[in-house]
Image (tube, rainbow, N blue to C red):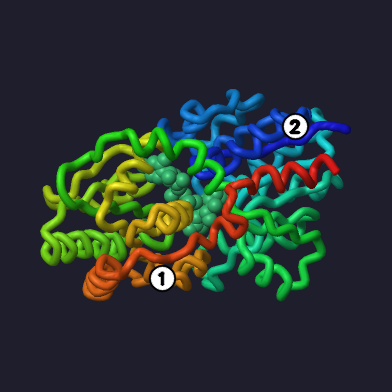
Amino acid sequence: MGRVVVCVGTRPDFIKMAPVILKLKERGVEYRVLHTGQHYSPGLADVYKELPIRDPDFHLEGLEGFKTHAGQTTLIMRWAERYFMREKPRVVLVQGDTNHSLACGIAARKLGIRLGHVEAGLRCYDWRVPEEHNRRMLDHISELLYAPTVQSVVNLGSEDVPGEIILTGNTVMDSLRMVLDEVRTQPAPVKGAYAILTAHREENVDDPGNLREIIKITERIHQGFGMPILFPAHPRTEDRLKRAKLGFESYVNVLPPLPYVKFLSALLNAHLVLTDSGGVQEEACALQVPCVVIRESTERVESVRVGASIVAGLNPTRVYKAAKEMISRPKEWTNPYDPFNDADAAERIVDTLIA
Ligand code: UD1
């Protein structure tokens, strides 16, 4: 039948592809896992160690010096091409919207290898967002488009993509279900009410002006609710804060990136989450944690639509008002990231590779 190569390279890839990797194993499909090394900081690049999957079969290393989008993408593309030529996969699977997924996708496409895109069809229609470029390009060169929600099927349909569109649900829900019992046994990181902040998008943290707004948001939230704020800081954000000589007040507890289960437990027990992360918006929606998106747009529109989050941008007053509204809202929404209500997205994906 020929093997499947699963390309992973960032923290969210490991989390979202782990259920697919497990299912490939369970169904006896021959596979290889390629770690492209886009994330190279400890805590992000090695999150697979926390998940019940084997270590990657091949790890591309040495990306640290390649900071630009094109530098990173072209280097991974060349490495991936060499790897695919050697491994001769019949299918390459990529996930989401990162540079390394685009790089692996193009390399596979040009070698005539069948390409599957997990988490296809997400759109924020905001051209300032680098991930939007990647997801659009990937959706137009993939044969198998694994759409996580009904909305993503509609988005792909409206763009007349050449590949086959398959509604699967979101593998983030498979992962969540896999660890939920353990998550529930973890103690809350802080006694009493607290908020969680995650911020690492390029358009937010690469601009010192926007970083200052994020700091002001924490001031406003602390002033308004008197809650401490936990901030597991992404290495990119740590770096940008240092370069801009900026820091938070003492009510913001700046932490290194948390292990997956610990992070989910901190999220589950939080009163509020302020985030620019994609996966965290989905998880907050599923765990019924009030969420305010500190971006001007989101591709997780389903969450907004069911009332699980508000997109508030970076204006501190707007964010405070949104937080107040979210905290008082009844948590009665249904989970749009699991349209089948069974957390079996990985099974549906692997089914298409066996049939
Ligand atoms: C980004 C994209 C997303 C895409 C993904 C992979 C956006 C807005 N986001 O991921 O669409 O699916 O790349 O291509 O474009 N977590 C921890 N510890 C922490 C903090 C978070 O384990 O301290 C976990 C969360 O539980 C979550 C994941 O990391 O599962 C989120 O990762 P993050 O780095 O925030 O990336 P995304 O923005 O989700």
Q: Compare marks 2 and 1 and give the one earlier in the sequence.
A: 2
In this figure, what is the number of numbered marks?
2
Q: State the quadrant of the C terminus.
A: top right
Q: Residue 105, image x and y in percent? A: 72, 48
| Residue depicted at x 33% and y 48% | 267
| The N terminus lies in quadrant | top right
**Residue at (67% x, 35% y) in the render:** 23
Three-letter code for the amino acid on which mark 1 is drawn = Gly
Can residue 70 be seen here? no
- Drawn side of residue 263 relative to residue 145, left or right: left
Where disc 1 sits, the SS reads loop
Left or right side of 80 for 42: left
Q: Residue furthest right?
A: 1
151 or 103, nearer to the observer: 151
User: Circle 2 sits on which residue?
Assistant: 27
Instruction: Give the percent coordinates (x, y) of residue 109.
Output: 80, 50
Q: Quadrant of residue 208?
A: bottom left
Work out whether residue 132 can be spotted: yes
In the rendering, which numbered label is found on residue 307? Answer: 1
